[in-house]
Image (cartoon, rainbow, N blue to C red):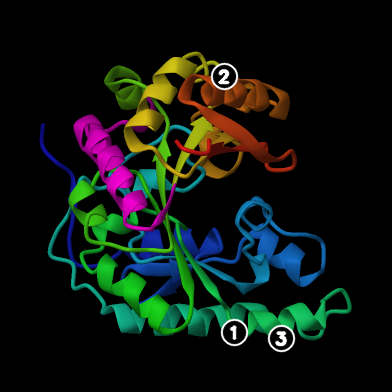
Amino acid sequence: MQRKSVNAGLSPDIIATLKRQGYHLVGKHSAVKPCLWLKKSLRGEGLCYKGLFYGIKSHCCVQMTPSIFCNQRCLHCWRPIEILNFEDVTDVEWDTPASIVDGCLREQQRLISGYKGAKTTDLKALDEARAPKHAAISLIGEPTLYPHLKELVEEFHKRGMTTFVVTNGTKPEVLRRITPTQLYLSLNATHEGLYRKISGADFWEEIKESLRVLRRKDEEGVRTVIRITCVEGLNMDDAEGYASLVKLAAPAFVEVKAYMYLGFSRLRLHRDAMPSHESVRRFAAEIAEAAGYKVAKESETSRVVLLARALGG
């Protein structure tokens, strides 16, 4: 099979599509986008589940990516993956980590500046937002396709910021090199056949190796998380299978989260593929029991349940 690759830059059509979707491009291949919860947090309307689970203030979080490209085509992804899916990324003139961080922080300031004159804005939160404390490297695309991810994480840390890296696990060799504050691995299947169906990709062995890397990262002091995205009628019938993969990685936490019927995913899935919070809660409890974890917290608004490793696990 001929591998699809990208080289040099983005076409004007792709750039226009991204801008219509609210992405603010930084340099040649990075982007920033304000999430719904940043807006809510600036208005004093609450925090996202990362705030509930990990203490992250949404208005102090920069949601960014160093690579808008992705090597999977997940059915449940709300992003415009049809135009940004590449198995190989070649001949790209990659921006430096420092220039990416500078550009992202600059765009973030521009994004929040419009809230100053709004009556609904919490001015204390706005003041805090001017000095962001966290970078969620999880916006669009697969960050491990950026060849200088290790240095990018370190650059954010030099600026006094913590980092979450969210990966699909297809590049275990990159995960071995990076040391973010928290490392997420998104998992959507329990076996290769289902993985191929959901992800439209062929990286199952790499993902299993990344799970082993996750175990070693936890031993190195990196907070590790597996995120399981639940799609009704597709991948919510094998709690034992997920538990075996959780045991392989032994992460500190497991997030069991509902697929949300949003964005471009609506072109691939029906609304009834979005499970209720009650369904997610039941499935999470089954995984927890099979894996030896415990239900720690949950957010009904985001339809997500947090499992924590049992003491001594």
Earlier along the polypeptide chain: callout 2 or callout 3?
3
Mark 1 residue element = loop
The answer to whether residue 50 is above or below residue 196 is below
Q: Amino acid at mark 1?
A: Ala
Does residue 273 appear anywhere in the picture? no
Indicate the position of residue 111 as horizontal and vertical percent values: 61, 77
Quick one: quadrant of the N terminus? Answer: top left
Magenta: main secondary structure: helix
Name the residue beneath numbered marker 2: 286
The answer to whether residue 205 is above or below residue 140 is above
Q: Is residue 118 left or right of residue 222?
A: right
Measuring 45% from the left and 36% from the top, which residue is drawn there? 313
Measuring 32% from the left and 43% from the top, which residue is drawn there? 215
Earlier along the polypeptide chain: callout 2 or callout 1?
1
Badge 1 vs badge 3, beta-carbon distance below 8 Å: no
Q: Which mark is residue 121?
A: none
Q: Is residue 264 left or right of residue 1?
A: right
Q: Which mark is residue 127?
A: 3
Q: Is residue 129 left or right of residue 31?
A: right
Mark 3 residue element = helix
- Residues drawn in magenta: 198-224
Measured Cα–Cα span from mark 1 to mark 3: 8 Å
Q: Which mark is residue 131?
A: 1
